[in-house]
Image: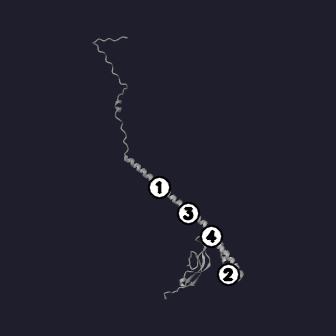
Amino acid sequence: MKIPIHNGDEQPEAAPEPRPTSEVSEGASEAMVDPMVPPAAEEPASADVHVQDIEAALAKKTEEYEATQEQLLRLMADFDNYRKRMTRQHEEARQFATADLVLALLPGLDNLERALNAAGQDVAPSSAVIAEGVRMVLRQLKEALSKVGVREVQTQGLAFDPTRHEAVDIVSVPASDDGHIVAEVQHGYLLHERLLRPAKVVVGRAERDANPEGA
């Protein structure tokens, strides 16, 4: 290996400067961004806008909740009314299921009362025995009917009521008895306050002067 020997007058050649590891093409340096400057961030949305959006969404949900609650309350009320109506109809059906049967029995009941009245007009001992037997059967029938809600329409001493009484005759009476029932021709009957058959009655009417002023 040769070692170079230099004279004192000779200057050693300067070492070449190192080239940068990465070369930048012409015109690219202007387009490059300074790495020390951070990129511009997007401007955040206003806080007021976010609050308004939240309030609008909350108001919408509140309105939907109230509408749903109102609908549920309405459905509950409708169901409660339906339940009450069904219960009432069931009770009425149960109470008046015997209406047709009672109506079919009333003519026989009337005939027993007529037979009892006829037997009471005969003074013969045999008629008295028959009358007692008819009276017993009549009493038992009325007791059985009363247990299912059947009772007679009241007429004695009452004013004529067209909703419960049927006038079959009109007779003259004093002014104090005008419009009142004078006699009962046929019993009327109710079933749980519903009229099965009106009572046939005679109604009193006071005679009025045709020209009370004397003209």
Q: In the image, 51: left or right of 213?
A: left
Label 3 sits on a secondary structure element that is helix
Label 3 vs 2, first from the N-terminus: 3
Q: In this figure, which residue is indicated by the disc labeled 2?
A: 120
| Residue extending furthest toward the bottom | 214
Tag on residue 147? 4
Residue 118 is situated, as x and y percent measured from the top left of the image, at: 68, 81
**Mark nearer the N terminus (2 vs 1):** 1
Rendered view: 113 above or below 44: below
Q: Is residue 27 positioned above or below 43 on the image?
A: above
Separation of disc 2 and disc 1 at Cα? 76 Å
Badge 1 marks a residue whose secondary structure is helix
Sequence-wise, the earlier of marks 1 and 3 is 1
What residue did someone put label 3 on? 85
Residue 87 coordinates in the image, percent (x, y): 57, 63
Placement of the N terminus among the 4 image quadrants: top left
| Viewer-nearest of discs 3 and 2 | 2
Q: Which of marks 4 and 2 precedes in the sequence?
A: 2
Residue carrying label 1? 67
Considering depth in this image, is 48 or 183 the residue closer to the camera? 183
Residue under the point 60% across and 76% down: 199
